[in-house]
Image: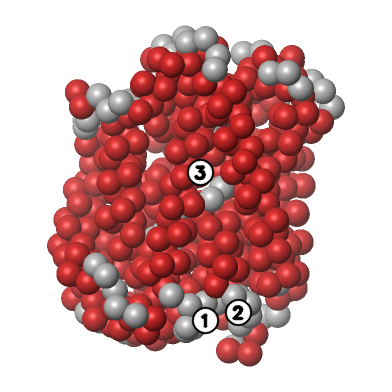
Amino acid sequence: MEKQRGSFTNRLGFVLAAAGSAVGLGNLWRFPYLAAKYGGGIFLLVYLVLAVTFGFALMITEIAIGRKTKLSAVGAYGALDKRFRFLGYLSSLVPFIITPYYCVIGGWVLKYFTVFLTGQVTASASDDYFTGFITQPAAPVIFFVIYALLTMVIVILGVEKGIEKASRLMMPILILMTIVISVFGMMQPGAMDGLVYYLKPDFSRFSATTVLAAMGQLFYSMSLAMGIMITYGSYMKKDAPLEKSVRQIELFDTGIAFMAGLMIIPAVFTFSGGSEEALGKGPSLMFITLPKVFESMKFGTVIGAVFFLLVLFAALTSSISLAETLVSILMDRLGWNRKKTCVAIMIFILAVGIPVSLGFGIWSFIAPLGMSLLDFCDFVSNSVLMPVVAFLTCIFVGYIIKPKTIIEEVELNGPLKIRKFYVFMIRFAAPICLVAILVFAVMEAMGAISV
Ligand code: PHE
């Protein structure tokens, strides 16, 4: 098994690839719509606090587990303690749920790229364009299939060639582009109100739901609690400074999410007046707001095309990382070769993704817990499974293998600066918060508390 495991050629390669996994639709699409919906500034504040405490501790833990065992999730937990093998399986379940629907949204992005490429800006800026598209039976499915194929082709090429090269090339351009678009957006009339809404916390809007949404987003955005960072850690060399790498990945990830909010939220105020309804658009927010921005920009068609191309790249590095995790799990487990495994995974993605895509249109009668299939998958992974996995990981590290196992691995590259804090987070703060969140998530789903 060891022989097949590639490894990143240098530390920058690792940071960029892990950041490539972390930075994706979660930052560009999911973060802004949650921030808009859950009160702007207060959501941002809660998210930031969680990122530097909770997110940091969890990411250190996962990467260290991967690097220590040189295995992906199932093998890794099993190698540290046989009884916790199930935790590996449980966390592996998450990318299986996310990957298909992630590719569905990837397909939407692909569609918008082609829309701008063919100059249909005005049409795409109209209010019903997006809904019109996702409710069709064939078109979104076709874009989804193309997107999924793109992902798998890169995965077949292997770790260094595919993932590393792709992420290196695309990340810097994406950052530049978000800066340009947000600066333009903020110069538009009404945008200042949006900026205030986004940056100034309104404490009257603080609630358990805000924390809950922010926490789910944190897992999602940083690719935590699903075995992904374990897989990435397993590709990391022993001499690479782990703590510093984690800081850089977090900074990258949070920075881009912040920029995405800056790009989208003020624009909602400019074009839709910042009403409750406009801010609460949910998953469609990016696809509805940004075309309006591009339509009003000089050279908006070109800028829009380039932008959606970059979002596509960001999404691809994430779906590659998702698919790579699935492939690596099956390869480690079943001893299949890479090609055969990739084909199997592709079939799986299609089998789940097609119903998810149709769930907005002809299959919308399938509505578990009153949600669309996509929202349901998102809910099961982000609000249920991930908190459970994160909780069990804390218990596992805090009380079974003990924090010192992780700390020793991290300290192969020099002292862990926040040793005491880390132990406190893993043993007490994180598990207690997680239980609270989980309870609220379930109660919310049952409609027991009003949101
Ligand atoms: N973290 C990625 C994002 O922000 C999404 C992702 C989730 C990637 C799960 C890998 C695994 O878009």
**Quarter containing the N terminus:** bottom right
Would residue 84 appear left or right of 239 to someone viewing this image?
left
Q: Secondary structure at mark 2?
A: loop
User: Can see residue 411?
Assistant: yes
Q: Residue at x 19, y 65 (%)?
A: 421
How crowded pointer 3 is (Cα within 10 Å; few <14, some 14-19, many 20+) is rated as: many
| Label 1 to label 2: alpha-carbon separation | 7 Å
Helix, strand or loop at mark 1: loop
Tell me which residue sits at (61%, 32%) in the image.
180
Q: Tell me where residue 40 appears, x and y as whole percent.
A: 36, 27
Given the image, on which type of amino acid does mark 1 rest?
A: Lys
How dense is the environment of label 1, judged by Cα within 10 Å: few (below 14), some, or many (20 and up)?
some
Whichever of callouts 1 and 2 sits on the residue coming sooner in the sequence is: 2
Label 2 is placed on what type of residue? Ser
Query: In the figure, is residue 164 to the left or right of 90?
Result: right
Q: Is residue 287 above or below residue 93?
A: above
Amino acid on which the number 3 mark rests in the picture? Ile
Q: Quadrant of residue 305?
A: top right
The location of residue 266, given as percent across then percent down, is: 48, 21
Q: Is residue 432 above or below residue 290?
A: below
Residue on which the image places disc 3 = 256
Residues at circles 1 and 2 in contact by the CB criterion of under 8 Å: yes
Q: Position of residue 358 (x, y in %)?
A: 64, 35
Q: Position of residue 373 (x, y in %)?
A: 52, 39
Q: Which of 38 and 347 lies nearest the eye of the viewer?
A: 38
Could you say which disc has been placed on residue 237 in the image?
A: 1
Q: Which residue is mark 2?
A: 7
Decide which of 61, 307 is in the foreground and name it.
Answer: 307
Q: At 34% across and 70% down in the image, what residue appears?
A: 61
Q: Is mark 2 within 8 Å of ligand 1?
A: no
